[in-house]
Image: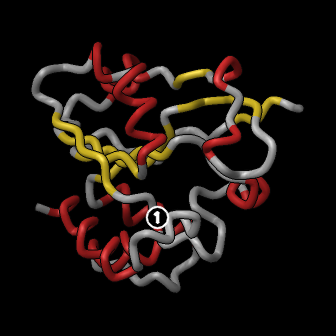
Amino acid sequence: MSRLEGFPPIALPHAHTLILGSMPGAASLAAGQYYAHPRNGFWRIVCEVLDIDPTLPYAERARLLAERGYALWDVLSACRRKGSLDSDIEPESMEVNDFDAFFAAHAGIARVFLNGTTAATLFKRHVAPRLAAHIAWQRLPSTSPANASYSLADKLATWREIVR
């Protein structure tokens, strides 16, 4: 199984909030875009919450997200995985992003939101123990289509937390 590499963060120096996934799925890696799977609700949800037109091209949505002070990244920088499911990530292959450098470059980050259980579990294990005390973090329901236990409306209601 080949090694998969994630993306650099989408972030501007004035970012106040970081949204983290676990690792991009196959559709995202193929497209070179965060949350590129057409059934993933991430962009619909975040665009609704932040009043961004969801029909804009990816680069424009990403730019507006960053301009509004939101950063987007993943906990893992690389791993081996067959398919797109987080449950298929080979634990021994996980490489965690350099959060020390990220938080040093984005000192205004005060909140971290984790997109789903796997992102939260990885963050809690690998990042939270070294996290500055002033940074709060919270798990939100995964926007993945694999998370069928929440409707899109329920996910949207919960994700409104990122603007509170």
Residue shown at the point (48%, 41%) measured from the top left: 118
Q: Is residue 48 above or below residue 122?
A: below
142 or 160: which is nearer to us?
A: 142
The picture places residue 139, in percent across and down from the top left corner, at 30, 47
Q: Is residue 137 above or below residue 126?
A: below
Q: Is residue 27 above or below residue 138?
A: below
Q: How is the image coloured?
A: secondary structure
Tell me where residue 36 sits by quadrant: bottom right
**Residue pointed to by mark 1:** 143
Residue shown at the point (39%, 26%) measured from the top left: 102
144 or 53: which is nearer to us?
A: 144
Q: Is residue 43 left or right of residue 113?
A: right
Residue shown at the point (36%, 46%) measured from the top left: 114
26 or 163: which is nearer to us?
A: 26
SS class, disc 1: loop
The picture places residue 137, in percent across and down from the top left corner, at 23, 39
The picture places residue 120, in percent across and down from the top left corner, at 38, 38
